[in-house]
Amino acid sequence: MSVKMKTLKVGMIGVGMGAGEIIPVFDTMPHIELVACADVNPAILAAFQDRYPAARTYNCAEALCKDAEVDAIWISTPNRFHAPQSILAAEHGKHVVVEKPMALDLAEAQQMVSAAKRNGVLLMAGHTQSYSLPIRAMRRIIASGALGRLQAVHLWTYSDWMLRPRTADELDPDQGGGVPYRQTPHQVDTVRLLGGGKLRSVRGTTGQWHPERPIPGYYSAYLEFDDGTPCTIMHNGYGYFVTEELVPWSKGYIRYNAQERVAVRRAQVAGERDEESEKQSMRIGGKDQTRVFSEWFGGKHWSPVDLGLVVVSCERGDIRHSKNGLFIYDNDGVHEVDLAADLSVGQRRSELDEFYDAVVNGKPLFHDGAWGLATLEVGLAITQSGRERREIMLNHQVEVAPDYDKDLPVPYLDKA
């Protein structure tokens, strides 16, 4: 006998490209319903209404937060609005998911955490690839001790992030523009999850290389965990070489192919690119929204995308991604672990599952405000370290909960 699941009713503030990425996954989850949205763009509101005829639309965040039917608010607005809108939603008694980056600085993030606690609601720092099944399986193997103690984590990516269309606020570092703000959450969340959560210090640098893009498009950092475990991360978003080229089965999961990247770069340098039109075409109802997001998340095999290549080294073996899961190198040779999942959609679906289970079923929320604040601290420290050319000590780190994913099945461990 099947048990009917309670429906979680969600309102979305900001229905731009971030929303365009998550909406196709919402549509696969019948127990989570998008019932309302708020946006300042009338065309976006009309497109949302067309897709969800029964939904309500608002032209300001406060009106949506007053909607009594809404249980939770999904915030995917420009970065400068993340903190004030999260606090607004919490003050109206709504649970909150905020997209990356959580906030522009630590003071904002602390205010968000305080507002959620004060109003008895949940705050989730969403949209990082630490939710993906291969990363979670890596963590289970590390925690099991099957390969001995964790010794090092290395993660690097080359992407076309700087070639993607940007609005004026996205080209302003003071509003959270650039790869260090927008992409460190993926990598930092991932390595923190793998290493236990508590980093001790950061030594990093950032790079802003193209005058036509007045934001940093590069960062690299050496991170050290409390127990001395070393970690390196790097993201080059300028799109000349892309990490996908190193993965023979990974085809079509980057935003632009090689020829398209050349054309985009030339238009960018010449100042002839209509980025607002490109943006609009990828938002809900746009002609490219399905191609860019629905099809992008329709692949069945793992791709580096914006996370990059991850190599975990333990005392008695290494772990990295494979086509369908993981390659594990141990004393008995190489093992490919098939995780038997749609790896492209899994990250965002796991995010929604964790939030639903926390709000509806009272289960722990692992990626909460304190976790998000700790990840933000590392990203900000990379920029500070590069500016001041010194190691930055961290003060807001939190551990991974000991029962995180304790029941996640991993065939390699089951066989062992």
Image (cartoon, rainbow, N blue to C red):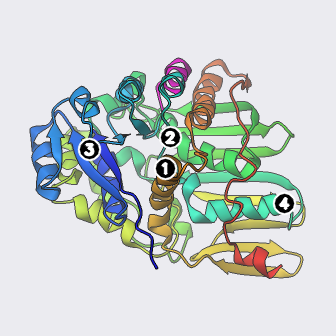
Towards the viewer: 246 or 310 = 310
Quadrant of the rendering where the C terminus is positioned: bottom right
Find disc 2 in the rendering and name its residue: 124
Q: Amino acid at mark 3?
A: Gly
Q: Residues within 10 Å of mark 2 (few under 14, many from 20)?
A: many
Q: Position of residue 175 (x, y in %)?
A: 38, 25
What kind of secondary structure does the magenta stretch mostly adopt?
A: helix
Q: Which residue is mark 3?
A: 16
Residue linked to disc 4: 314
Kind of residue indicated by mark 1: Phe
How far from the left and from the top, in percent, is residue 345? 44, 65
Q: Nearer the viewer, mark 4 or mark 1?
A: 1
Residue 95: image location, x then y, percent: 43, 38
* Circles 1 and 2: CB atoms closer than 8 Å: yes
Residue 384 circle label = none
Query: Which one is earlier in the sequence, the residue at label 4 or at label 3?
Result: 3
Residue at x-position 31% and y-position 63%: 27
**Which tag is nearer the camera, tag 4 or tag 2?**
2
Q: Which mark is residue 355?
A: 1
Apparent side of residue 220 relative to residue 140 in the rendered image (left or right): left
Q: Is residue 111 magenta?
A: yes
Q: Earlier in the sequence, mark 4 or mark 2?
A: 2
Chain-order first, disc 1 or disc 3: 3
Disc 4, disc 2: CB below 8 Å? no
Q: Residue at coordinates 67% horizontally, 59% vertically from top-left?
A: 405
Q: Residues within 10 Å of mark 1 (few under 14, many from 20)?
A: many
Residue at disc 3, secondary structure: loop
Residue stretch in magenta = 102-113
User: Image check: 208 left or right of 43?
Assistant: right
Q: Work out whether mark 4 precedes mark 1 in sequence or the reverse, and give the earlier one.
A: 4
